[in-house]
Amino acid sequence: MLEEVERWLSTRSWSVTDRPLHQILAAKQRTGQSVSVVLPALNEEETVGDIVAIIRHDLMQQVPLVDEIVVVDSGSTDRTSEVAAAAGATVVHRDEILPRVPSVPGKGEVLWRSLLVTSGDIVCFIDADLKEFSSDFVSGIVGPLLTNPEVDLVKGMYDRPLRGAAGQGGRVTELMARPLLNMHWPQLAGFVQPLGGEYAARRNLLEQLPFPVGYGVELGMLIDALHLVGLDALAQVDVGVRKHRHQDGQALGRMSAAIYRTAQLRLARGHLIRPSLTQFERGEDGFEPRTYSVDTEERPPMVEIAEYATRKVA
C-alpha cells in the first residue's frame, strides 16, 4: 500500500505553478466545460466580500475561467448576504433551496443543496472565512479537472499556520482524520489536507455521492469518491498558505466527533443510537456538563432527488 501511495504522490500531487493560467484557459475553451464556485457561509461578513471580489476580478473579468459565484447563506445573523451580493456573488439562502426537505444546520447540508442552484460542469468549493485570499486557490484546484479528463476530484493542500506558528493548524486533521485514514483507508494517506474546505470536483461525481450534513462532509466525500472512481481519479494541488479563523478546543471536539461518526458509518453501516458528546465548561458551581448531539444524518446522492432530475432535463 505504501508503494501505491508513493506512486500516487508522484503522479497526482501538483503545485499551482504546474499549470499556467493560459494553459487552463485553453483547456476550458477546448473542452467547453463550465465552472461554478460555491462559498458556504455563516456569519462571514468580514471575509466573504473580499473572496468574492478577488475571484470576480481575477477569474471572471480579467480572464474567463469562472462562470458563476454562488454564496449559500446558512442562516447568518450578520451582513454576510448583503456583503456577498455587493461584491458580485449570487446569494441564495439555504432554506430557499429544495424547500420540501426541511433543512438542518451543517456545512454538508449547504454544499449538498448548492448542487441545485449551480450549473457548472465543475463545482469548486471555497470556505468563506479565508484571509489574505488568492485566486490561486480556485485556478489551482480547477486546473487539473480542465486539463486531465482522468481526474474527477482535486483537493487543495497548503500550510495552515496557527497564531503565527507554521504547520500547527489543522488540529482535527492531525489528531482525528489522518489516523483514521491511515488505519482504515490507507490509499488516502497521501492527502495533505483531507479535511480542507477548498476542493473541486466534476458535477457527475458530486451528484452520485451522499453528503454528511455536518463537518464530516469532506471525509465522507473523499472516502466515497475513492470507492466510486478509484485513487487515480483523485488529486491534490499545493496552493500555498491558508489563513482563516480558528475555532476553540470544544468546537474542534464536536467536529472530531462528527468526523469519527462519518468514518464509523462507512466502516459498518448498521443501525446505531444517535450519538452525543458531553463536554465541560466551568460555571459558578464548578464544571458543568454540556451535551451536544453529533451530526449523523446524510443527504442522499443528488441524482436521487426528483427536482434535480427535472432541472437537468429542463
Image: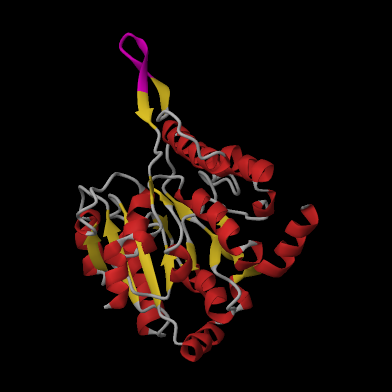
Q: Is residue 155 left or right of residue 106?
A: right
At a point 56% along the width and 86% down the height, the residue shown is 23
Q: Quadrant of residue 135?
A: bottom left
- Position of the C terminus, as image quadrant, is bottom left
Q: How many marks?
A: 0
Q: Position of residue 200 (x, y in %)?
A: 48, 66
- The question of residue 262 being in magenta is answered with no
What secondary structure predominates along the stretch shown in magenta?
Answer: strand
Q: Is residue 240 visible?
A: no
Give residue 128's position: percent from left, percent from top.
36, 57
Instruction: Specify how the rendered protein is coloured.
Output: secondary structure
The residue positioned 57% from the left and 38% from the top of the image is: 176
Which residue reaches farthest right? Answer: 3
Q: Out of 150 and 67, give the one closest to the viewer.
A: 150
Q: Relative to 197, is 245 above or below?
A: above
Residue 90 visible to the viewer: yes
| Front-lying residue, 273 or 200 | 273
Read off the magenta span.
281-290
Q: Residue at x 63, y 62 (%)?
A: 230
Residue lying at the far top of the rendered structure = 285
Q: In the figure, is residue 218 to the left or right of 233?
A: left
Residue at 32 percent of width and 60 percent of height: 305
Q: Left or right? Give the position of 90 relative to 199.
A: left
Expressed as whole percent of the image width and height from the top left, the position of residue 251 reads 41, 35
Q: Which one is in front, 1 or 17?
A: 1
Residue 286 lies within the magenta run:
yes
Left or right relative to 114: residue 150: right
